[in-house]
Image: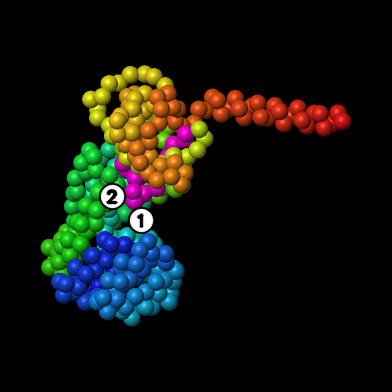
Amino acid sequence: MRILLMGDGEWASDSLLRLHEEGHDVAGVVLRTRPTSSALAQAAAAIGAPVFQPADASAPEFLASVAAAGPELILSVAYDQILRGSVLTRPPRGCVNFHAGKLPAYRGRNVVNWAIINGEVEIGVTAHRMDEGIDSGAILMQRVVPIAWTDTYAEVLRNVVGVMPGLVADTVRGLESGALIAEPQPPGAGMYYGGRIPGDEWLDWGDTSRDLYNKVRGITRPGPGARTLLLDQPVVIWRAEYDPSWPRYRATAGEVVGRCASGAVVVKTGDSTLLVHEAQTGGQPAGPPGWRLGTRLGLNAGAALAALAARLSGLEQRLDQGRDA
């Protein structure tokens, strides 16, 4: 089958090479305007496929290029532009998106992170028809990847990337044979997730240990890492541990209440504790935090408001003194 593949990253490059190995005719490869890696461009060069990189995938000049390439099928694997209008109906076999989420529940962006943050025990990888919506088209095929209690973002991402080429190849094979039947997604059943932005990574020590643990492992490497404060200085929490059997009790959230010989520390949460194994402050190397007992993490809202009020009062007094002079 003659295929145009749009995408980014290792999952797109591995899928492209798999399709080439299976004898499909690659009409072209479409890169993101700002690719996250050079993997797909390198794979395209390795098989001699034409490369496109439109700033706007709906622009007439790009649509003309697609028409000239003459693909029977367009595939999207981590492509960041939403295809609409005539491009969706141009290829005879349509357009298919491959989404790292268990549709219809996980539509949108950064859903690998969100699945871990939500404590899911599995994540779906879904092939679906592309329509005018976002991740809302009829489902062609879906694979399920388990998420273990200790899996981090890097491990889940690696497992999803590993599944993608097989799903892409099987979907194309099923479309070619006519064996695949698209199942419409139930109306109103979708859950949408927005992209994570700077500021989303901050920890609230008043949350439950389970939620804090899931957030730490959900945005650790290759993500930005979870953040907290130590004496008004940002700290990245890279690795933590939690066992639901640990005691549940009320005390000051964010306080270091235990230390280990390894340098790991036990931090009180809203309902139990969290064992912090690896943290990083400023430009220092990451490692066991080794904080003393009684160390307080996070923002003390009451103290911050009191300090702000005192500072404001001081400024007002200076202004009054200036008027009287």
Q: Going by the picture, which residue comes out furthest to the top?
A: 250
- The spot of residue 312 in percent (x, y) is 68, 30
N-terminal label among 1 and 2? 1
Residue 313 image-quadrant placement: top right
Instruction: Check residue 21 for magenta coloring.
Output: no
- Which residue type does callout 1 highlight? Gly
Q: Going by the picture, which residue comes out furthest to the front?
A: 261
- Which residue type does callout 2 highlight? Ala
Residue 196 in sight in this render: yes
Instruction: Look at mark 1 in the image and give the residue it sits on.
Output: 133
Residue 241 is left or right of residue 194, and the answer is: left
Instruction: Look at mark 2 in the image and give the residue it sits on.
Output: 154
Residue 161 is left or right of residue 321, and the answer is: left
Residue 279 image-quadrant placement: top left
Residue 89 in sight in this render: no
Residue visible at 23% across and 65% down?
15
Q: Which residues are magenta?
A: 215-230
Residue visible at 29% across and 30% down?
261
Nearer to us in this view, 240 or 312:
240
Nearer to us in this view, 120 or 228:
228
Q: CA distance from mark 1 to mark 2?
A: 29 Å
- The spot of residue 60 in percent (x, y) is 43, 74
- The spot of residue 321 in percent (x, y) is 81, 29
Which dot, 1 or 2, sits closer to the camera?
2
Residue visible at 37% across and 44% down?
286
Q: Tag 1, which secondary structure? A: loop
Residue visible at 18% across and 52% down?
143
Residue 317 image-quadrant placement: top right
Alpha-carbon neighbours of circle 2 within 10 Å: few (<14), some, or many (≥20)? Answer: some
Quarter of the image with the C terminus in it: top right
